[in-house]
Amino acid sequence: MFSIRVYGILINEKRQVLVSDEFIRGGYYTKFPGGGLEFGEGTRDCLKREFKEEMDLNVEVGDHLYTTDFFQMSAFNPQYQIVSIYYFAKAIEGIKAPLRTKPFDFDEREMKIYEEKQETETFRFIDWEDFSSQSVTLPIDKVVADLVKNLNPGI
């Protein structure tokens, strides 16, 4: 079985890369914002929905960057193969979600969400100079982080 995931690479005007710090099933993960494709949904619509649900942020989905081209088993269910699709994304409004400066800096509200759902997340920007594949946790995200860093977008 397959799990299709769609993620956005959002780089702001200060040349900072947006990441999501997540606490899922007792584990800590830093990844790009996004999530699972739902039945009947296109990949670009999925990414727009995920940004709206997770950050209450409307984004413009830009160019396709990468689609997984190697086998990756799900970290949460070994019966699933992960296929991740990455696009550049641009905020078309100001970010309303709280942004953190430290990894996994969850507040009381976010920890209550964890108690209910067994997962929670928060967001932060990483300065371009500090951003690398070491900034993210998941294997496919590491490949994408290297691609992004090698592109050296002139923002």
Image (cartoon, helix red, strand yellow):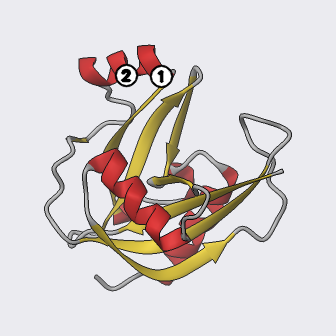
- In the rendered structure, the answer to whether residue 83 lies left or right of residue 92 reads right
Say which residue appears at 28% left-offset and 70% top-offset: 15
Is 81 drawn above or below residue 114 in the view shown?
below
Q: Residues within 10 Å of mark 2 (few under 14, many from 20)?
A: few
Q: Which one is in front, 104 or 75?
A: 75
Q: Quadrant of the C terminus?
A: bottom left
Label 1 crowd bin: few (<14), some (14–19), many (20+), radius 10 Å: few
**For the point 25% across and 57% down, which residue is it?**
57
Amino acid tagged 2: Ile
Q: Which residue is tagged 1? A: 117
Q: Where is residue 65 drawn, in percent x and y?
A: 55, 78
From what the image shows, is residue 125 above or below residue 10? above
In the figure, is residue 153 to the left or right of 80? Answer: left
Image location of residue 133, percent across then percent down: 57, 58
Residue 12 figure quarter: bottom left
Q: Is residue 22 left or right of residue 129?
A: right
Q: CA distance from mark 2 to mark 1?
A: 6 Å
- Res. 113 mark: 2
Q: Position of residue 103 (x, y in %)?
A: 38, 36
**The one of 101 and 4 positioned closer to us in this rendering:** 4
